[in-house]
Amino acid sequence: MVSVFLSLIDSESDKEKFTELYNTYKDLLYWIALRKTNSVEDSEECVQETFFYVAKHFEKISDVKSKRTKGYLSAIVTGFAIDIYNNSKKANTVSLDDEDSADIQYYEDFEKTELLTAFDNVLDEESKIYFYLKYIYKYKSSEIAQIYKVKDSYVRKKLQYAKEKLRKHLEERK
């Protein structure tokens, strides 16, 4: 399967780097997707979509083994998993109780426990992902919209609502 993705990459050094990326993260991404979709077939599709997307945008990967790369891939596979899960109509919401180790690493960047608790308890999974990509990984809302195949205005509204929810929650706790 990796040969299909390699055909999207030009240089030999990038092909080797992509192969290393694939071998390093395929199991983690599968596990994340499986936790979100509860389906082996859907999980495999999510992982394939993730690597296909990464192969097309491989210039965004600098260090294969960095936390940033791990978080980036985890966010992408989570987005695909949420899309597939929602489209399958198995349930109306994605469980927020299923935390995985990649999600926990994202939280390490927040300095205040109070903000972490608010972030975890108040925001839905989709808002968390958009928030991470926008404010931690410095993506533009238009790039996030392109990744998740939604309108830019939808991403901006989700981010606006997420900030407002966090603000209200933190004000209530004072």
Image (cartoon, rainbow, N blue to C red):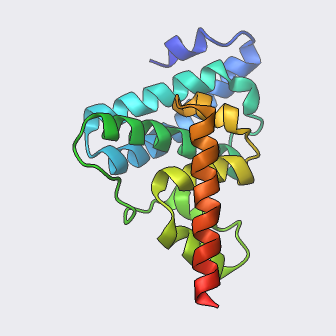
Residue 73 in view in this figure: no
* Residue ID at (62%, 11%): 8
Query: What is the total number of numbered labels drawn onto the structure image?
Result: 0
Residue 113, how many percent across, how many down? 64, 81
Residue 91 lies left or right of residue 112; in this view the side is left
* Residue ID at (66%, 47%): 133
Vertical arrangement, residue 4 with respect to residue 30, above or below: above
Residue 82, how many percent across, how many down? 40, 42
Which of these two is toward me, 81 or 167?
167
Which of these two is toward me, 121 or 44?
121
Q: Residue furthest left?
A: 90
Q: Quadrant of the C terminus?
A: bottom right
Which of these two is toward me, 141 or 50?
141
Q: Quadrant of the N terminus?
A: top left
Residue 102 in view in this figure: yes
| Quadrant of the rendered image containing residue 161 | bottom right
Q: Residue furthest bottom?
A: 174
Vertical arrangement, residue 161 with respect to residue 39, above or below: below
Vertical arrangement, residue 58 with respect to residue 91, above or below: above
| Quadrant of the rendered image containing residue 17 | top right
* Residue ID at (31%, 34%): 87
Residue 72, how many percent across, how many down? 63, 43
Residue 5, how many percent across, how many down? 55, 16
Vertical arrangement, residue 152 with respect to residue 121, above or below: above
* Residue ID at (59%, 59%): 162
